[in-house]
Image: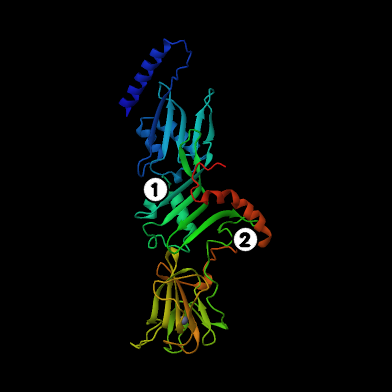
Amino acid sequence: MKKVVLLIFVLLLLLACSKSKDETLEEIDPFIYRSGVLEDGETLANALMDEGLDNGMVYKLVNKLDSLYDLRHAHPNDSFTVKLDSFNIIHELSFKPNQIHNYRIIRDTSDVFYSQIDTLKLVKETSVVEGEIESSLWQAMSDEGIDAATIVMFTQIFQWDIDFFIDPQKGDKFHIVYEKNMDTDGNFVKAGNILAAKYSSKNYNDIAYRYTNKKNEIRYYDNKGICIQKAFLKSPLNYKRISSYFGNRYHPITKKVRFHNGVDYAASYGTPVEASADGTVIHRGWKGGHPTVNGQKGGYGKTIIVRHGNGYKTLYGHLSSYGKYKVGNRVKQHDVVGYVGSTGLSTGNHLHYTIYHRNKAINPLKLKNVSGPPVPKNEMEKFLSSIQSLQRYFISGATTDSNK
Ligand SMILES: [Zn+2]
């Protein structure tokens, strides 16, 4: 390290000498700069002392820096620079935990240290990219130069309709209008917002527009103001009452306290049961479990299971009969998947309803409602005019250079 610094110093001197032949009165920086990155488990103080700097001086500066940036949050690969004079006295310590901020402790002429935070000036740039899936969405988007954070945001917009781990097929298309934060030299620094996005497949074709409503909520809506980020229905049917809640309960048939992994809704025989969110039917048939008593089969009886995006599944049990959807069919929220009955281990007409997240039953009544309602009627005009400038990007053939 020292050799390299020395070499650079000599080179700089040579460069300075050769330059001095010119008429330019360029000032020669008399300081030496040493930069490095934190290694795994290394503190900034250790890293600086490893550079052979005076311990007392290092502690003083690092403490000062710590009041500017909490160094407990420092990570491996965060970078630092020290500015030294020829007596190895530190004149400045700067620390960059990210690309945007540079935390600096600077010695002024009277040997007093002051601190300063430099913030990189970012310029927003709008990008429009279209592509087609060969193997995966990730691959297709990366190939088009889209950054990882933006790809993740894209999948989050459509997560209620598309399970990006399973659904994408070769030939599916994406189209995205998004912001990039660049530095003033035009280098990409970090992802911005997705302003509009489109995904087209055999089963899906919709454009999502970003819009901040009057409540200051940012949502993605289709061109009619319907929220793309769909929630699960509060309940998948019109019920009379909740006859059993999620949690431990005394089972009327088994006469044991058992964990009830869903919610039971008492309802009339034949009441339509609706898919609580868009998804794909993955089970249609008799299902055990819930609980099986001494080998007695029964459980959920006639059951539908729907798989949704983002690791969610819903189960509808004790049905008297099924709707028209078969395994593999896509269902929309509100599509009738079955009718209330009392098949399986059941004491009366009711729907047993479970929501699974990553195969773990969660309480449907406590599920966070992730979607907003549609754009309110009194905001529609504002909404429509705000998406107008984005819509032109989706006229077929429109590309990045559509500047009209
Ligand atoms: Zn139940």
Of labels 1 and 2, earlier in sequence is 1
Q: Give the x, y percent position of residue 365.
A: 53, 73
> In which quadrant of the rendered view does residue 238 lie?
bottom right
What amino acid is found at the position of numbered circle 2 in the picture?
A: Val
- Residue designated by label 2: 375
- Front position in the image: 367 or 250: 367
Residue 61 percent coordinates (x, y)? 47, 34
Question: Which residue is identified by label 1?
Answer: 142
**Front residue (pair 68, 149):** 149
Q: Which mark is residue 153?
A: none
Task: Say which residue appears at 46% left-offset and 87% top-offset.
Answer: 342
Whole-angstrom CA distance, mark 1 to mark 2, is 33 Å
List the single residue furthest toward the front: 397
Q: Amino acid at mark 1?
A: Ser
Q: Quadrant of the N terminus?
A: top left
Q: Is 19 rendered above or below residue 57?
A: above
Q: Residue at x 45, y 84 (%)?
A: 321
Vertical arrangement, residue 181 with respect to residue 112, above or below: below
Question: Which residue, as the protein is rendered here, is positioned at the far left?
Answer: 3
Residue 168 on image: x %, y %: 39, 60
Total label count? 2
Which image quarter is the C terminus in?
top right
Answer whether labels 1 and 2 touch (C-beta < 8 Å): no
Q: Residues within 10 Å of mark 1 (few under 14, many from 20)?
A: some
